[in-house]
Amino acid sequence: MTVLRIENLGISFGGVNALAGVGFTVRRGDIFAVIGPNGAGKTTLFNVVSGIYTPKTGRILLGDKDVTGLPPHQLARLGLSRTFQNLQIFFRMSAVENVMVGRHLHENRNVLAHFFTLPSVLRQNKTTREKSEDLLALVGLRDYADRSAGALPYGALKRLEIARALATEPHVLLLDEPAAGCNPVETEEIDVVIQKIAASGVTVVLVEHDMRLVMKISSRIHVLDQGHTLAEGDASEIRNNPAVIAAYLGAQGVTEVRRARG
Ligand SMILES: Nc1ncnc2c1ncn2[C@@H]1O[C@H](COP(=O)(O)OP(=O)(O)O)[C@@H](O)[C@H]1O
Ligand SMILES: [Mg+2]
């Protein structure tokens, strides 16, 4: 079953085509990775799909509904959520409050007005708190619920960000570089969390630079380069694709890889 379909997506900034004719289909239960060198258009793709930018060409279908151009809060209501490449954590709030805010930010259009009523909302809404604690448990942060987010180590913050994105109960979750800046232990923890999320029935679309992680957990991999689709396939197809190797390593690299393989 198709949960997300991108068709002929295009957007440009100034003279730069950040995306040009990009299309793919994500199926239910996929861990679908989007990879590509810096500047390939990965974050722009997420910005368009999550409603932050309106595309110049193309369509975005969530299930069979055309959602092109809908704003983020409407997309959240339709079951799409995302994390950001840079942490979007409120460091003075506790971990559980950060997750609860994730819920409320998407429930209310006027974020600022809502912000002033936040303390009372946070106190009153017991269900929200319980659901948020469950999400913390899912990402391995159950014991950190009442700790100040500012006191959490970096790897835990990356997982807190994921818990917050899950607070709107999405069925499609876009993760922009969830393991960026993580050490191998933290990356392994993120790996486990992503697989748990996928196993719980949420379809995951992942932008990630850590190729070991991508190759290990992704069911499909879509490769972008300078706004264009370069390739799509499973891990072994992508790993052995000369155009992909060239995009990452340059033509010189292809020769070296060939030599190294004997
Ligand atoms: N808001 C913006 N304004 C101007 N240029 C942008 C903007 N967002 C992205 N770009 C440009 O689009 C291209 C793709 O960027 P991005 O999507 O961030 O790449 P990636 O996430 O793959 O590293 C880059 O050339 C970048 O400079
Ligand atoms: Mg990016």
Image: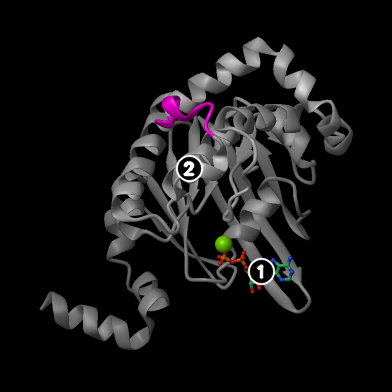
Which residue bears the numbered disc 1?
Answer: 18
- Give the image quarter of residue 40: bottom right
Residue 189 seen from this side: yes
Q: Nearer the viewer, residue 139 or 71?
A: 139
Amino acid type shown at disc 1: Ala
- The answer to whether the residue bearing label 1 lies less than 8 angstroms from the nearest atom of ligand 1 is yes
- Give the image quarter of residue 67: top right
- List x then y, in percent, for residue 159: 47, 40
The residue shown at (58%, 39%) is 4
- List x then y, in percent, for residue 10: 70, 62
Which residue bears the numbered disc 2?
Answer: 152
- List x then y, in percent, for residue 110: 87, 35
Amino acid type shown at disc 2: Leu
The residue shown at (67%, 39%) is 61
Secondary structure at badge 2 equals loop
The residue shown at (65%, 40%) is 92
